[in-house]
Image (cartoon, rainbow, N blue to C red):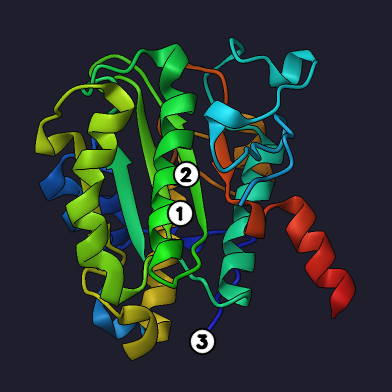
């Protein structure tokens, strides 16, 4: 599979109409998300280390062991991604490709619209990834994922997630995701609370056209990281940013198999 470097995401500074359209969205409703994930033209060619600074979390936030320190407080507030968090998320995405679990779908969950308070959003996301990971495992598939929380007036608390889901299990994911939301929130949710689209606009793109999938994946990651702070933007040459909004608790996370400890162990075995 072709692996494009993501140390600097060129699409953040691109001037083509398709690249500019990526950042014209002010919220991730279904139509805008679909347009974003298909914006690149064809010619373009499970627990983690609980390190709050890097944004690594356990596979289920509700059962994660708490550690002391202001960086890991559940009530800690933030308004943007830090350089350390951006660096970890970018490295995690690269590692997912290296171990054969490239991200194939982008999910957006509007937790506030589902009735989840801002301070409970991290627990809700952790529960969702736990349920998703267990169901995929029962059907013989490993997975990898990363997520970023955002907030702010008009949008409310919501989660952007990139995840590896094999094409043959996508229908299973779509059938189960509303029941997972009911289990997490304790009530029925409107279908528009969650949006799930294939990266690149069609299933199996990572196999049928890996180069095109890699370009679309780079664009998806760029969108997920758009709420970084100014220091991170300078470090990674990002110029097209959007406010990430107020978040309480963990702002981002990854699955254990692509987290910092997993990457270190993998590198030592090579």
Of 153 and 13, the residue lying toward us: 153
Question: Is residue 188 toward the left or the right of residue 2 in the image?
Answer: left
Q: Going by the picture, which residue comes out furthest to the top?
A: 75
| Quarter assignment of residue 151 | top left
Of 114 and 27, the residue lying toward us: 114
User: Residues under labels 1 and 3: Cα distance?
Assistant: 24 Å
Badge 1 element: helix
Does residue 253 lie above or below 182 as drawn?
A: below
Q: Position of residue 28 (x, y in %)?
A: 23, 39
Q: Mark 2 sits on what residue?
A: 130
Does residue 55 lie above or below 163 as drawn?
A: above
Q: Position of residue 30 (x, y in %)?
A: 14, 46
Q: Mark 3 sits on what residue?
A: 1
Does residue 187 lie above or below 182 as drawn?
A: above
Residue sitting at 51 percent across and 87 percent down? Answer: 1
| Quarter assignment of residue 68 | top right
User: Residues under labels 2 and 3: Cα distance?
Assistant: 28 Å
- Mark 2 and mark 3 lie on one chain; the one further toward the N terminus is 3
Badge 3 element: loop
Residue sitting at 56 percent across and 79 percent down? Answer: 3
2 or 3: mark nearer the eye = 2
**Which label belongs to residue 133?**
1
1 or 3: mark nearer the eye = 1
Question: Is residue 126 toward the left or the right of residue 234 in the image?
Answer: left
Residue sitting at 29 percent across and 31 percent down? Answer: 183
- Mark 1 and mark 3 lie on one chain; the one further toward the N terminus is 3
Visible in this render: residue 220? yes
Q: How many marks?
A: 3
Visible in this render: residue 40? no
Whether tag 2 and tag 1 are in contact, CB under 8 A, the answer is: yes
Q: Going by the picture, which residue comes out furthest to the right?
A: 268
């Amino acid at each position: 599979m072709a692996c494009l470097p993501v140390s600097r995401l060129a699409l953040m500074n691109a001037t083509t109409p398709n690249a500019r359209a990526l950042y014209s969205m002010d919220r991730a409703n279904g139509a805008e998300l679909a347009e974003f994930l298909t914006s690149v033209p064809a010619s373009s060619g499970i627990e983690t280390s609980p390190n709050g600074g890097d944004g690594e979390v356990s596979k289920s936030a509700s059962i994660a062991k708490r550690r002391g320190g202001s960086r890991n407080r559940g009530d800690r507030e933030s308004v943007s991604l830090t350089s350390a968090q951006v660096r970890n998320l970018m490295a995690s995405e690269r590692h997912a490709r290296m171990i054969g679990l490239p991200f194939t779908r982008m999910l957006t969950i509007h937790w506030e619209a589902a009735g989840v308070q801002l301070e409970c959003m991290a627990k809700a996301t952790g529960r969702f990834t736990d349920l998703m990971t267990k169901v995929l495992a029962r059907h013989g598939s490993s997975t990898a994922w990363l997520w970023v929380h955002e907030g702010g007036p008009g949008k409310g608390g919501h989660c952007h997630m990139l995840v590896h889901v094999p094409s043959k299990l996508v229908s299973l994911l779509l059938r189960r995701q509303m029941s997972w939301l009911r289990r997490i929130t304790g009530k029925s949710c409107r279908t528009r609370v969650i949006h799930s689209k294939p990266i690149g606009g069609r299933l199996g793109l990572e196999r049928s056209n890996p180069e095109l999938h890699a370009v679309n994946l780079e664009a998806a990651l760029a969108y997920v990281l758009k709420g970084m702070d100014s220091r991170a933007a300078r470090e990674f040459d990002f110029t097209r940013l959007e406010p990430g909004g107020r978040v309480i608790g963990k702002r981002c996370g990854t699955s254990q198999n692509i987290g910092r400890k997993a990457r270190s162990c993998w590198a030592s075995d090579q």
